[in-house]
Amino acid sequence: MAKLHVPNLVCVQQVCSRYECEEDGVDCVRCGTRKHSFGENPVGDLLSYLTEPRPRANKIVATAHNVKAFDLHSIFNRAIVLKWKPELIMNGLKIMCMKMEHLVI
């Protein structure tokens, strides 16, 4: 039986197309705070953050360093609980990409 991976920390660094080359540690004047950490309810807080209204963005693209191994499975499980209908690109049992609403992960 496989063990369920439960994330205890999610860190995000956001960039927008206008300021993606700006120096690290400086907040974006268009997007605000660039670095976020979620620890109490990491997957739920991450999805809440990613689905916040952003008037200047019609699509959010997120990457994860270990998405095909297990990172995306926690997000997929939460999306199912929320009754979202994610579209998956799979390689065997590995989730390579997931699209839902205006998010691409």
Image: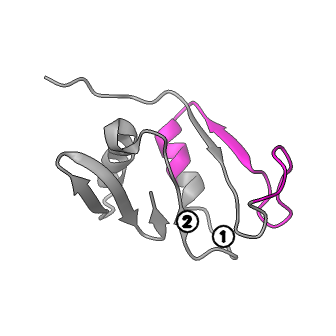
Q: CA distance from mark 1 to mark 2?
A: 9 Å
Range of residues picked out in magenta: 21-47
Q: Residue at x 51, y 35 (%)?
A: 41
Secondary structure at badge 1 equals: loop
Query: What sort of colour scheme is used for the picture?
Result: one colour
Chief SS of the magenta region? loop
- Examine the image and state in which quarter residue 11 appears: top right
Residue lying furthest front = 21
Q: Determine contact: label 1, label 2, CB under 8 Å.
A: yes
Q: Is residue 93 above or below residue 61?
A: above
Q: Which residue is mark 2?
A: 60
Residue behind mark 1: 54
How would you rate the neighbour count of disc 2 (Cα within 10 Å): few for under 14, some for 14-19, many for 20 or more? some
Q: Amino acid at mark 2?
A: Ile
Tag of residue 9: none
**SS label for mark 2:** strand
